[in-house]
Image: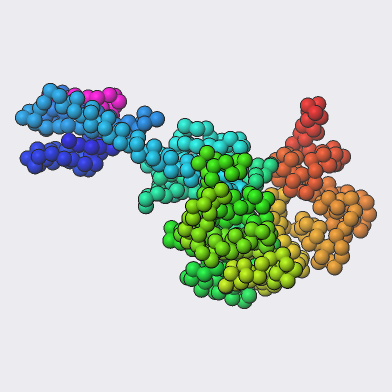
């Protein structure tokens, strides 16, 4: 009895020793190739070519050596797609021939198909369970579950996604390593959304988590699981997303912070990470957590993203009927999902005061109770808390419990603001320049010294996140190789001059800084016209995207496009006329 793959290559051979030895003389053994294109008519190759059971008698074989043998072969098909996965074949010399060999081969093939279908069904259920957990507890806008063969087994309807249920995504198949799929997704699906799913030590498929930034409206709740954040380096495509190598910086204060974080990564103690908005607190939290395969799951929850009732349900879970959106079986909370791993609580200072003793007790005792349930559930989580507030002041003001503060701040990590990280601005700018250019499929730009001088004078209140957004805007709003000062946001130019943000009509829209209008109204309008023209051209005439890049409304951009006649071959005037007719 032989088992082959879909190309007719023998994967396994079983039988009595004498027959196996005779088969080896004809390469009817493991590794032998028996497609019709290689050896002509034979049981295995004919079954593959016709897609039907094949019974080939002695002289019907093409190869002379096989003419004394009889073969009964049956294709093994994949449930759902009917794709031939391989062939089961019973072959032997005349002494082994039985009239029911073909019936036996058909029965064996069907048993294999049933076993495979059962395994796939279990894997699909595991994928759906993970998908539903992540969707219900995350800030994702949509989610797609893909099995090992590239088949879409679940697709949410929260937004329009470029795939359909039961469709095999083009370019993905069982012969491609799941880890390589991220680079072969169809247009509209980004590699950074891709997360392989493992069960019992092997990859069973993947989940594509579409972040809420990918759609116009947001979603409730603050939990997100392995969803890349804006501002991460190109290495964020690594599904583990947990290495210190993803954090860029060579300043003394940043090196000190990273060295301390690396020490804490080896200890399962609570960590409080604090710093201004946009410094990259969660990125450091993931690095402290370590590899998901070693450190367990990483579950992040934003304590300021929901009401008190929802926060309690999300953290501790609930039983059936307790909440209006409860599932029939209830739902585990973040503590249970993070069991054995890390629970990351962002904006811990926003946690409602009456929930703080409940959190403290869960951390102290390692036991939680789902809402509406009296059954204790033991959990083992490492807490990483994050805040941009001064929690000591919050304690003194009575907004945060002192005992909880001391419980979550056993060890502390301060991430310095970007303005205090000498030398890191250049490194981060170039990293974002290269990685974001690759992501958007555009050429990196050169930041001339004059531009870098202005950027160094800016205080960057939004820190690394703000820098990332500025670089991304500069990449997408011009096709010129070098960045010029007049392209920088007005707040950067105003601070470099030591002046308040300009409030003239053009500068208020974020198009033209005040200094550029000093030579008169004509100069201001010329500069504004050029800024609009660059943005419109950079986005191929798409005024919606151009308006977003410029920071103005579409209606304002429509008026100015008409006023300045910036179509230049893009036929924008005709487009606007048609648009008005539709309106």
- Residue at image position (54%, 64%) is 363
Q: Is residue 531 left or right of residue 116?
A: right
Is 48 covered by the magenta stretch? Answer: yes
In-front residue for pair 114/329: 329
Name of the residue lying farthest toward the front: 374
Residue 12: give x, y in percent of width and height.
21, 41
Q: Front-most of 499 and 261?
A: 261
Quadrant containing the N terminus in the rendered view:
top left
Residue 4 covered by magenta stretch? no
Between 518 and 553, the one nearer to me in the picture: 553
Question: How far from the left and from the top, in percent, is residue 108?
Answer: 23, 31
Q: Position of residue 11 (x, y in %)?
A: 24, 41
Q: How many marks?
A: 0
Q: Is residue 356 above or below residue 44?
A: below
Q: Residue at x 72, y 61 (%)?
A: 462
The answer to whether residue 365 is above or below residue 236 is below
Q: Which residues are magenta?
A: 47-59
Residue 282 lies in what quarter of the image? bottom right
Whether residue 291 is visible here, answered yes or no, is no
């Amino acid at each position: 009895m032989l088992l082959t793959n879909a190309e007719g290559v023998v994967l396994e051979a079983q039988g009595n020793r004498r027959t196996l030895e005779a088969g080896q003389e004809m390469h009817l053994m493991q590794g032998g190739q028996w497609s019709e294109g290689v050896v002509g008519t034979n049981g295995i190759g004919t079954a593959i070519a016709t897609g039907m059971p094949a019974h080939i008698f002695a002289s019907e074989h093409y190869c002379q050596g096989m003419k004394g043998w009889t073969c009964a072969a049956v294709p093994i098909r994949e449930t759902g797609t009917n794709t031939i996965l391989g062939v089961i074949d019973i072959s032997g010399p005349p002494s082994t021939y039985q009239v029911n060999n073909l019936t036996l081969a058909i029965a064996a093939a069907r048993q294999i198909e049933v076993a495979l279908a059962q395994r796939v069904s279990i894997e699909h259920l595991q994928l759906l369970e993970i998908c539903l957990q992540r969707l219900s507890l995350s800030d994702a806008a949509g989610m797609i579950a893909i099995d090992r063969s590239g088949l879409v087994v679940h697709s949410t309807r929260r937004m329009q996604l470029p795939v359909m249920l039961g469709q095999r995504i083009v370019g993905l198949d069982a012969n491609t390593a799941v880890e390589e799929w991220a680079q072969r997704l169809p247009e509209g699906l980004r590699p950074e959304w891709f997360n392989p799913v493992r069960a019992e030590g092997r990859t069973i498929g993947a989940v594509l988590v579409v972040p809420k930034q990918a759609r116009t409206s947001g979603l409730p709740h603050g939990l997100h699981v392995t969803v890349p954040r804006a501002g991460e380096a190109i290495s964020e495509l690594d599904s583990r997303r947990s290495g210190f190598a993803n954090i860029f910086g060579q300043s003394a204060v940043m090196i000190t912070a990273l060295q301390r974080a690396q020490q804490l990564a080896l200890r399962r103690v609570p960590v409080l990470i604090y710093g201004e908005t946009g410094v990259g607190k969660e990125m450091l939290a993931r690095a402290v957590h370590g590899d998901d395969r070693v450190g367990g799951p990483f579950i992040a929850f934003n304590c300021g993203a929901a009401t008190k009732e929802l926060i309690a349900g999300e953290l501790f879970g609930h039983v059936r009927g307790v909440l209006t959106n409860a599932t029939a079986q209830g739902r585990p909370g973040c503590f249970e999902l993070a069991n054995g791993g890390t629970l990351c609580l962002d904006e811990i200072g926003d946690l409602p005061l009456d929930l703080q003793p409940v959190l403290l007790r869960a951390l102290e005792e390692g036991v939680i109770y789902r809402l509406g349930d009296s059954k204790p559930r033991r959990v083992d989580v490492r807490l990483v808390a994050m805040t941009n507030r001064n929690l000591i002041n919050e304690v003194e003001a009575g907004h945060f419990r002192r005992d909880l503060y001391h419980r979550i701040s056993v060890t502390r990590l301060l991430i310095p603001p970007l303005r205090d990280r000498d030398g890191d601005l250049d490194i981060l700018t170039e990293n974002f320049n290269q990685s974001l250019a690759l992501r958007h499929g555009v050429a990196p730009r050169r930041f001339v010294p004059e531009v870098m001088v202005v950027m160094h004078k800016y205080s960057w209140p939004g820190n690394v996140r703000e820098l990332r957004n500025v670089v991304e805007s500069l990449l997408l709003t011009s096709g010129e190789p070098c960045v010029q000062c007049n392209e920088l946001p007005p707040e950067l130019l105003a601070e470099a001059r030591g002046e308040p943000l300009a409030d003239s009509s053009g500068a208020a829209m974020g198009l033209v800084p005040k200094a550029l209008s000093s030579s008169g109204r004509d100069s201001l309008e010329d500069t504004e016209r050029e800024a609009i023209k660059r943005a419109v051209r950079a986005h191929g005439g798409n005024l919606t995207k151009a308006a977003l890049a410029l920071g103005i409304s579409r209606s304002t951009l429509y008026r100015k496009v008409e006023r300045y006649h910036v179509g230049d071959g893009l036929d924008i005037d005709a487009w606007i006329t048609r648009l008005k007719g539709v309106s």
